[in-house]
Amino acid sequence: MKIRCAILDDYQQVALQSADWSRISDRVEVTSIDRHFDNTEELIERIAECEIVVIMRERTPFRAELLTRLPRLKLLVTTGMRNASIDLTAAAAQGVTVCGTGGAGNATAELTWALMLALARNIVPEHNAIRSGGWQSTVGSDLYGKTLGVLGLGKLGSKIAKFGQVFGMNVIAWSQNLTQERADEAGVKLASSKEELLASSDYVSIHLVLSDRTRGLIGAADLKQMKPTAYLVNTSRGPIVDSTALATALQEGWIAGAAVDVFETEPLPQDDPYRSLPNLLTTPHIGYVSKANYEAFYRDAVADIEAYLAGAPVRVLG
């Protein structure tokens, strides 16, 4: 009998076309599921017989309470090499091997810049105006000569800093661990504090890992520090920004606008205020959703399964 494997949250139904799953088809029966399960009981019913589960980033959390109800689970593969929604301690205690994958690495930075340009030039309102018979209804903002504040100067933040420099922006950066040496390497100014960065920037882009230290890092007081003409972009993790505070900031005009690709609850609830704010540009967590990235994710997922079957797991997390 073949080992059963489920691929969860394959929203676009592309997982099986993104890699050569035939390499394991003689030993593993793979099922792709294209919907998200909000109901835990329904999720368990669908994957209870699976020895292997492949998950896409943090779309479906695997906490201790779920893991303990999946006694057949032996291998959990997550796309990427970090997934804060998996309880690695509980997985290890239950004998579940957790493996990660590589990725293409450029998709999120490209989307971040696309969102910033769309905000600056009112791309969505102008597109909608054309569709409804209108013509030139707004005046766009410029990037050239403006100040870009980058919160987090790691792999992604550094790319955004370079994009800003190419567009003629003055780039400043800050994070709790950012050093003068690292800022000098990137050719950007080190802000003395989060407050200085927020008050000085015309555009603020967030590129931090979600942790106890960064959760709620941008709250109401921080948003009030920003210029009323400034824009905020978050393609990192939703909980880094207080969602209620951001909604209020946009409704009351503390800042000019924002673009968000990540949310506290995903998929975004139907009644969430983020769905209707006119000065908020939203995308459904697609920063990493690109052809090259998916091919890398699922190619490595297949390789992870092959290595597990051979008794020598690779890219083990924890």
Image (cartoon, helix red, strand yellow):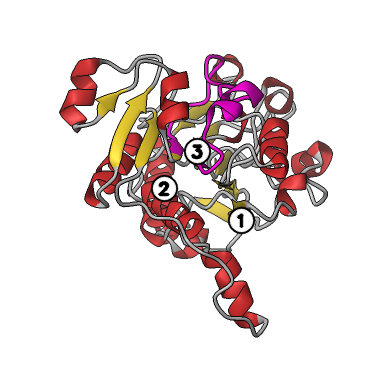
Q: Amino acid at mark 3?
A: Thr
Looking at the image, tell me whether mark 3 or mark 2 is earlier in sequence order.
Answer: 3
Q: Which residue is mark 2?
A: 108
Q: Main secondary structure of the magenta part?
A: loop
Q: Which residue is mark 1?
A: 31
Mark 1: give few (<14), some (14-19) or many (20+) Cα within 10 Å. some
| Observer able to see residue 60 | yes
Residue 310 is covered by the magenta coloring: no
**Residue 29 or residue 217, whichever sits in front:** 217
Q: Position of residue 171 (x, y in %)?
A: 30, 36
Q: Give the Cα distance between marks 3 and 2.
A: 18 Å
Q: Between label 3 and label 2, give the one nearer the viewer.
A: 2
Mark 3: give few (<14), some (14-19) or many (20+) Cα within 10 Å. many
Q: Residue furthest bottom?
A: 133
Secondary element at image label 3: strand
Q: Which residues are magenta?
A: 204-232
